[in-house]
Image: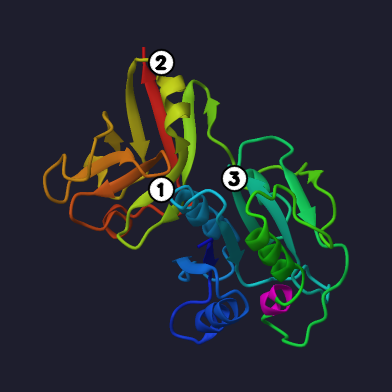
Amino acid sequence: MPVLTCTTDYGLKDPYAAMLRGRLLTRFPDWRIEDISHNISKFDLLEAIYVAKTAYGFFPPGSLHLVDVGFVPKLGQNTAPTYCVTRIDEHWFVLPDKEGIIPQLSQTIGHPVQRYPLTIPQPLAGFQILNWLDGPVGMLIQALESNPGLVVAPEPWAAPVPDQSVNWIEQPKVIDGVLVGKVVYADHYGNLHSNIARHVLDQFADGKTIHILLKSVRSHENKVERIHGHYHAVKNNDLVLLYNAGGFLQIAMAQDHAYNLLGLRVNDRVMIERIE
């Protein structure tokens, strides 16, 4: 049974997530519908991409991942949301067609992306994705159902073109000998996830001792000298740094809420210095 996942900012209080799942189950009964998250912060496409990127590799190859968050048109433009399609690591993605979204999912430069060339009618104002499920996205799902080995979305999707956009989020940079990254996501447990990938940190450290510098309100926890192997490698309420499931540096507290206690927020800097 093929798998289709959903990542949205619909929340669980309102009927929207159920409406989406209901339409999917009705239109595509041979697909297994799974939720990655419906609790993405409102309008936060970057957070949605971060969550989907961390989770998608745990699903079987050939899965299709639908990402949808509240649409904010450009000032003065009365436009409806549009979606694009891309295929990464044998996984399909249907995403809001916003510049810079593909590089957040894949570091491959110029990754192929497909767009729908025509305008979709909008009988369900404010819930445009349902119209797309009845149109070109639905055609893609049906095509994958009949041909799981498909590598290009069928017509009416346009032919793949290289994505030339750049990351919205800054990548870690070395500034005056210091690796500078930032917090990009805070999870339900209050753990803070950075944009510093393990391979980037390993390359920077080059086997030398490092100090990780944080902007914490707890002054005695503004500097850490090691990365731990698990959450309980320190005493209760102590700071612990480790790599999350996606391989990015994570800031946490043993059995406590780092977001509340440290005072760190999304976009705060995480700096790493190498001790020569």
Secondary structure of the residue carrying numbered label 1: strand
From this viewpoint, which residue is outermost toward the right? 118
Q: Mark 1 points at which residue?
A: 193
Which residue occupies the extreme top position in the image? 276
Question: As drawn, is 1 to the left or to the right of 139?
Answer: left
Residue 36 lies, with reference to residue 268, above or below; the image says below
* Magenta residues (range): 128-133
* Identity, as a three-letter code, of the amino acid under mark 3: Glu
- In front: label 2 or label 3: 3
Say which residue appears at 40% left-offset and 48% top-offset: 193
Magenta stretch holds residue 152: no
Identified at 28% across, 54% down, the residue is 258
SS at mark 2?
loop
The answer to the question of whether label 1 and label 2 lie on touching residues, with beta carbons closer than 8 A, is: no
**Which disc number belongs to residue 90?**
3
User: What residue did someone put label 2 on?
Assistant: 206
Q: Earlier in the sequence, mark 2 or mark 3?
A: 3
Disc 3 secondary structure class: loop
